Image (cartoon, helix red, strand yellow):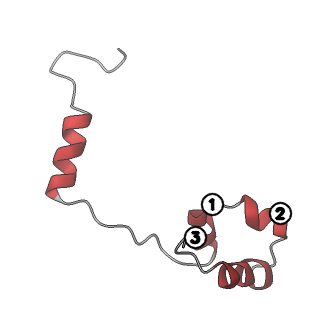
């Protein structure tokens, strides 16, 4: 199961938003949610998530540039 209610999404996109089937199927789920007025409901970044990002993408040291 994909977790998407395709019949309802298709109805909202094609009937509610008047999208053609081709346009509907070219959208990403995030784009469709935005068009339907649903804000992105992602999890907020917590300290553990920030630490993971900092470890993966450390700041350049003083005097170093990011140009590589």
Give the total of numbered labels.
3
Q: Secondary structure at mark 3?
A: helix
Residue at the image position 80 percent from the left and 73 percent from the top: 19
In this rendering, would 8 be left or right of 57? right
- Residue 62 image offset from top left, x and y in percent: 15, 20
Q: Are marks 1 and 2 in contact (CB under 8 Å)?
A: no
Q: Secondary structure at mark 2?
A: helix
Q: Which corner quadrant of the image does residue 21 belong to? A: bottom right
Q: Label 3 to label 2, Cα distance in Å?
A: 18 Å
Q: Position of residue 27 (x, y in %)?
A: 69, 61
Q: Residues within 10 Å of mark 2 (few under 14, many from 20)?
A: few
**Distance from label 1 to label 2 (Cα)?**
12 Å
Q: Which residue is mark 1?
A: 28
Can you say which quadrant of the picture contains the N terminus? bottom right
* The furthest residue to the front: 1
- Secondary structure found at label 1: loop
Q: Position of residue 29 (x, y in %)?
A: 59, 65
Going 16% across and 46% down the picture, which residue do you hit?
Answer: 51
Number of the label disc, if any, that sits on residue 65: none
Towards the viewer: 65 or 24: 24
Quarter holding residue 60:
top left
| Numbered disc in front, either 3 or 2 | 2
Disc ID at residue 34 = 3
**Could you tell whether 47 is left or right of 33 in the image?**
left
- Corner quadrant of residue 47: bottom left
| Along the line of sight, the residue nearer the viewer: 3 or 21 | 3
Query: Image quadrant for the C terminus?
Result: top left
Where's residue 28, x and y in %? 63, 60
Callout 3 crowding tier (Cα within 10 Å): few <14, some 14–19, many ≥20: few
Q: Which residue is mark 2?
A: 22
């Amino acid at each position: 199961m994909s977790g998407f209610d395709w019949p309802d999404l298709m109805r909202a996109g094609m009937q509610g938003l008047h999208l053609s089937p081709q346009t509907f199927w070219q959208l990403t789920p995030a784009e469709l949610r935005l068009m339907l007025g649903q804000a992105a409901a992602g999890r907020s970044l917590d300290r553990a998530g920030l630490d993971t990002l900092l470890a993966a993408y450390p700041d350049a040291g003083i005097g170093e540039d990011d140009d590589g």
